[in-house]
Image: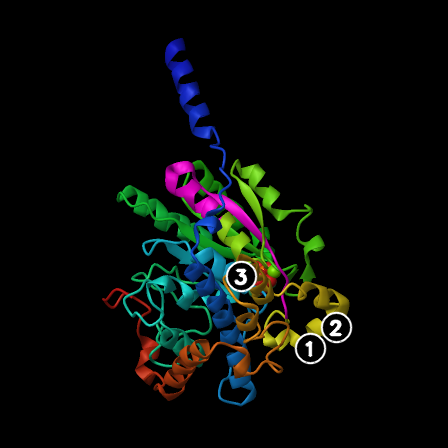
């Protein structure tokens, strides 16, 4: 039986462990250079063009399979990834396809050694070719790369958060300081595994930053039938961790909030939730586009798409004096859906980069038949 003093010390230890370090709100955007801001602007065009181009390719009959659009949600992907270190991990899902190649893009768009996939990798995956990181064994976002610090995406919503927590737990035990960004739609947060994983991360103070892409819809279910809070971020209170709300249309606000959480996590203060408020531009996937027109009133869609992340970023750059009025009017992709947008609406560098990925994938071979019997069990290698 422990002495009274021993019990008091143990109680204090427990209280110390349960104490929440306050999150210091940061404005890391103030330290971004003009070049950084212009790069973020270009990456927004790139994420949008990826979407536009795939829809056009499918319309032309050069591509099959379902597309899950990130149109209007690009600021979340671009803003959250920009401040990461190469050693950090990400866990993207179906709505984050551009994140696979935008990760670590600061190390050079065409630098094959950077800690993100190449556009050739990602397009090969979309086209189901042998050159895809998953060797075309599955489609869309069902890829990952241990070497590039990208956790394999699955269709089991919220199912990657425990895996992400385990990855950074192992990294901590090995003396690393990596953080992980997990991405989840607001609908996926109703899964039991979401609560289990966040709770586990909270009690072990793991550097897991959960980004909630709150696009107001989970397939055909609106948010008021998903949870009963004005701000989803308040769920964080129940786990004893910070929860921030970001304007998901504003790449700089996303950057500020995510980097605040990253600093907090890297300093050993544990996980947090960042709710990014946005709006899903199209149907759940392109198979749902026509149905979505029936279950969502046109006024709601128009309002939800009225704050285009490209236009908002441009406005900020003009106000900062980083973009002249003349240059600002050069490429006007905002507000246009894939049927309206033309290549001339995007910077030529963006179009050329995506074009290289598309042409590589179109020409790449399909996998050999025997590939189907492989990779169920470990076959060596580190991908
Ligand atoms: C555990 C589980 N339940 C249901 C589904 C089917 N499903 C796939 S996406 C989706 C809606 C997801 O909505 P949300 O999490 O808000 O993400 P969004 O698609 O809006 O980005 C559903 C129900 C699934 N993949 N996994
Ligand atoms: Mg959603």
Which residue corresponds to the image point at 68% horizontal and 61% vertical from the top-left?
221
| Residue that appears at 50% across and 33% down | 22
Q: Quadrant of the N terminus?
A: top left
Q: Which x, y percent locates residue 145?
A: 34, 64
- The residue at which mark 3 appears reads as 317
> Among all residues in the image, which is located at the extreme top?
4
Rendered image: mark on residue 294 = 2
| Residue matched to label 1 | 290
For label 2, the SS is helix
Who is closer to the viewer here, 104 or 283? 104
Q: Is residue 113 left or right of residue 62?
A: left
Q: Quadrant of residue 127?
A: bottom left
Near mark 2 (Cα within 10 A), the count class, few <14, some 14-19 or many ≥20, is: few
Q: Which residues are magenta?
A: 258-281
Question: Is the distance from the Cβ of mark 1 to the nearest ligand 1 atom less than 8 Å?
Answer: no
How many angstroms separate mark 2 from mark 1 (CA)?
7 Å
């Amino acid at each position: 039986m422990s002495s009274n003093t021993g019990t008091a010390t143990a109680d204090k230890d427990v209280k110390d462990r349960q104490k929440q370090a306050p999150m210091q709100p940061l404005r890391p955007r103030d330290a971004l250079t003009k070049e950084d801001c212009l790069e973020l602007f270009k990456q927004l065009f790139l994420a949008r063009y990826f979407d536009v181009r795939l829809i056009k390719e499918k319309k032309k009959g050069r591509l099959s399979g379902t597309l899950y659009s990130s149109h209007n949600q690009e600021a979340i992907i671009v803003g959250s990834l920009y401040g990461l270190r190469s050693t950090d991990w990400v866990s993207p899902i179906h709505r984050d396809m551009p994140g696979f190649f935008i990760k670590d893009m600061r190390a050079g768009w065409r630098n094959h050694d950077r800690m993100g996939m190449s556009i050739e990798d990602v397009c090969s995956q979309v086209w189901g070719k042998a050159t895809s990181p998953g060797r075309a064994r599955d489609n869309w976002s069902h890829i990952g790369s241990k070497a590039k610090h990208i956790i394999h995406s699955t269709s089991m919503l919220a199912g990657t958060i425990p895996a992400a927590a385990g990855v950074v737990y192992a990294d901590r035990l090995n003396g690393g300081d990596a953080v992980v960004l997990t991405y989840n739609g607001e609908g996926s947060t109703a899964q039991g595994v979401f609560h289990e994983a966040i709770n586990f991360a909270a009690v072990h103070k793991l550097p897991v930053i959960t980004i909630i892409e709150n696009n107001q819809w989970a397939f055909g279910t609106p948010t008021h039938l998903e949870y009963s809070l004005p701000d989803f971020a308040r769920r964080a209170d129940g786990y004893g961790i910070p929860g921030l709300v970001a304007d998901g249309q504003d790449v700089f606000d996303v950057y500020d909030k995510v980097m605040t959480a990253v600093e907090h996590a890297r300093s050993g203060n544990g996980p947090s939730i960042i709710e990014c408020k946005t709006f899903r531009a199209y149907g759940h996937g392109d198979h749902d586009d026509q149905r979505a027109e029936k279950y969502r009133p046109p006024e709601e869609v128009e309002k939800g798409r009225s704050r285009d992340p490209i236009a908002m970023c441009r406005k900020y750059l003009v106000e900062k004096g980083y973009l002249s009025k003349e240059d600002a009017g050069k490429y006007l992709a905002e507000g246009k859906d894939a049927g309206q947008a033309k290549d001339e609406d995007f910077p030529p560098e963006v179009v050329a980069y995506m074009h290289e990925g598309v042409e590589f994938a179109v020409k790449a071979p399909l996998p050999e038949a025997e590939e189907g019997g492989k990779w169920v069990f470990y076959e060596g290698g580190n991908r």
